[in-house]
């Protein structure tokens, strides 16, 4: 509960929960063909921080959205889903989405299916 500048409640999540939410967005957000490069930029950041995923939180969110109805959601299943998703992405479109938000555009030179697949291996 915070009371300044007026009273309100705040929900707090740890990094593991936030990363689970980001993974849920990467895997299950329904943007059709529109790629959110900002989500992949965040994914890269979580990997750099060495953040692990709260798999229980991810599974709960995926069940709530009716995107996961199988058994327990394992890390291997998450990795497989991410790799499948990565293989379908137009990386030029992803780069175009993030460009307005970053100053050093050369960091995007490495962005590719291979690069993000290698990041998935670090989960």
Image (tube, rainbow, N blue to C red):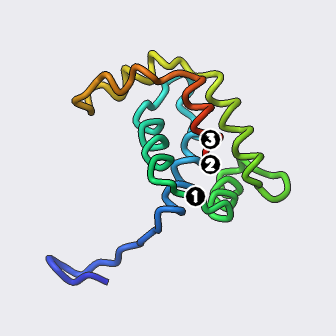
Is label 2 or label 3 in front? Answer: 2
Q: Is residue 7 above or below residue 75?
A: below
Q: Residue 102 at x, y = what percent?
A: 26, 32
Left/right placement of residue 7 relative to residue 40 reads left
Who's the residue at 68% across and 32% down the image? 83
Q: Is residue 58 above or below residue 30?
A: below
Q: Residue 50 at x, y = what percent?
A: 51, 54
Q: Is residue 36 above or below residue 49?
A: above
Q: Earlier in the sequence, mark 2 or mark 1?
A: 1
Who's the residue at 57% across and 58% down the image? 52
Q: Residue 60 at x, y = what percent?
A: 67, 62
What is the secondary structure assignment of the residue under circle 1? loop
Confirm or deny contact between disc 2 and disc 1 (CB under 8 A).
yes
Q: Earlier in the sequence, mark 1 or mark 3?
A: 3
| Residue bearing the label numbered 3 | 28
| Residue bearing the label numbered 2 | 123
Q: CA distance from mark 2 to mark 1?
A: 7 Å
**Farthest residue, direction left:** 5
| Residue bearing the label numbered 1 | 52
- 72 or 1, nearer to the observer: 72
Residue 54 sits in which quadrant?
A: bottom right
Q: Earlier in the sequence, mark 2 or mark 3?
A: 3
Who's the residue at 85% across and 57% down the image? 71
**Classed neighbour count for the residue bearing mark 1: other residues with Cα under 10 Å, few (<14), some (14–19), many (≥20):** some
What is the secondary structure assignment of the residue under circle 3? helix
Q: CA distance from mark 1 to mark 3?
A: 19 Å
Residue 73 sits in which quadrant?
A: bottom right
Q: CA distance from mark 2 to mark 3?
A: 18 Å
């Amino acid at each position: 509960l915070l009371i300044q500048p007026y009273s309100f409640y705040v929900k707090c999540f740890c990094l593991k929960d936030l990363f689970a939410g980001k993974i849920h967005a990467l895997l299950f957000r329904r943007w059709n063909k529109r790629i959110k490069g900002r989500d992949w930029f965040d994914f890269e950041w979580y990997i750099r921080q060495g953040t692990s995923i709260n798999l229980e939180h991810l599974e709960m969110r995926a069940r709530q959205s009716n995107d996961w109805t199988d058994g327990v959601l394992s890390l291997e299943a998450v990795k497989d889903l991410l790799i499948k998703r990565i293989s379908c992405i137009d990386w030029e479109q992803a780069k175009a989405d993030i460009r307005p938000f970053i100053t050093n555009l050369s960091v995007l030179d490495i962005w590719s299916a291979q690069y993000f697949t290698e990041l998935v291996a670090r989960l």
